[in-house]
């Protein structure tokens, strides 16, 4: 008379085929690859191997020095930007605290200071987001 309004999920069928593992064959293949690699090394002349190793070591040294200098510059930029942003943020929060503490005292009107501060906070946040996106693009 009444049909079920909720549809019940049907059971799922899984077809699992286990892998076949032969440790003897794996060991044989590993030993075979090792022997082939040793033969290739013997075929190459020692001078060619030494030249290749020298070129590779020079390339690695140059590459690592270059990469290291860029890495240090990035870290320095991040720390400088982080320290500067903390100083600006503390100054903004200090100004806001000063204005809100003295808002009602002495009958002075802090309207322009308050609106200036309320304008500077979003501008600071906007520049902070842009600078972070530039740093992430550099990485």
Image: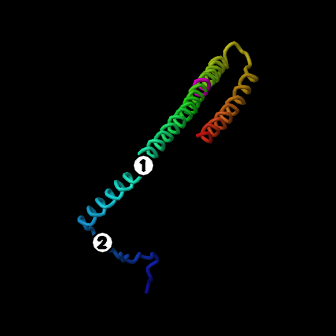
Residue at image position (54%, 35%) is 62
Mark 2 sits on what residue? 18
- 5 left or right, relative to 76: left
Question: Which one is nearer the viewer's eye here, 15 or 92?
Answer: 15
- 7 left or right, relative to 130: left
Residue at image position (36%, 55%) is 37
Where is residue 118? Give x, y as percent. Answer: 70, 29
Residue reaching furthest to the left: 24
Answer above or below: position of 29 versus 79. Answer: below
Residue 125 among magenta residues: no
Where is residue 17? Give x, y as percent. Answer: 32, 74
Secondary element under disc 2, as helix, strand or loop, is loop
Q: Magenta segment, which residues?
A: 81-85
Residue reaching furthest to the top: 106
Asked which colour scheme the image uses, the reply is rainbow
Residue at image position (46%, 77%) is 5
Q: Which quadrant would residue 111 be assigned to in this image?
A: top right
Question: Which one is nearer the viewer's eye here, 132 or 88?
Answer: 132
Mark 1 sits on what residue? 45
Where is residue 112? Give x, y as percent. Answer: 76, 23
Question: Which one is nearer the viewer's eye here, 98 or 81?
Answer: 81
Answer above or below: position of 54 versus 4. Answer: above
Secondary element under disc 1, as helix, strand or loop, is loop
Q: Which quadrant would residue 38 be assigned to in this image?
A: bottom left
Where is residue 24? Give x, y as percent. Answer: 23, 65
Quadrant of the image containing the N terminus: bottom left
- 79 left or right, relative to 52: right
**Who comes first in sequence, dot 2 or dot 1?**
2
Distance of mark 2 from mark 1, alpha carbons?
Answer: 46 Å
Residue reaching furthest to the bottom: 1
């Amino acid at each position: 008379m009444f049909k079920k309004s909720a549809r019940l999920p049907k059971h799922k069928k899984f077809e699992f085929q286990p892998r076949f593992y032969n440790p003897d064959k794996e060991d044989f293949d590993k030993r075979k690859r090792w022997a082939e690699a040793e033969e290739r090394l013997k075929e190459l002349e020692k001078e060619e191997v030494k030249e290749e190793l020298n070129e590779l070591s020079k390339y690695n040294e140059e590459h690592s020095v270059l990469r290291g200098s860029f890495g240090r510059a990035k870290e320095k930029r991040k720390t400088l930007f982080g320290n500067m942003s903390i100083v600006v943020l503390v100054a903004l929060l200090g100004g806001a605290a000063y204005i809100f503490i003295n808002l009602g005292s002495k009958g002075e009107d802090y309207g322009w200071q308050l609106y200036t501060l309320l304008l500077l906070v979003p501008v600071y946040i906007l520049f902070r987001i842009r600078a972070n996106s530039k740093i992430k693009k550099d990485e």
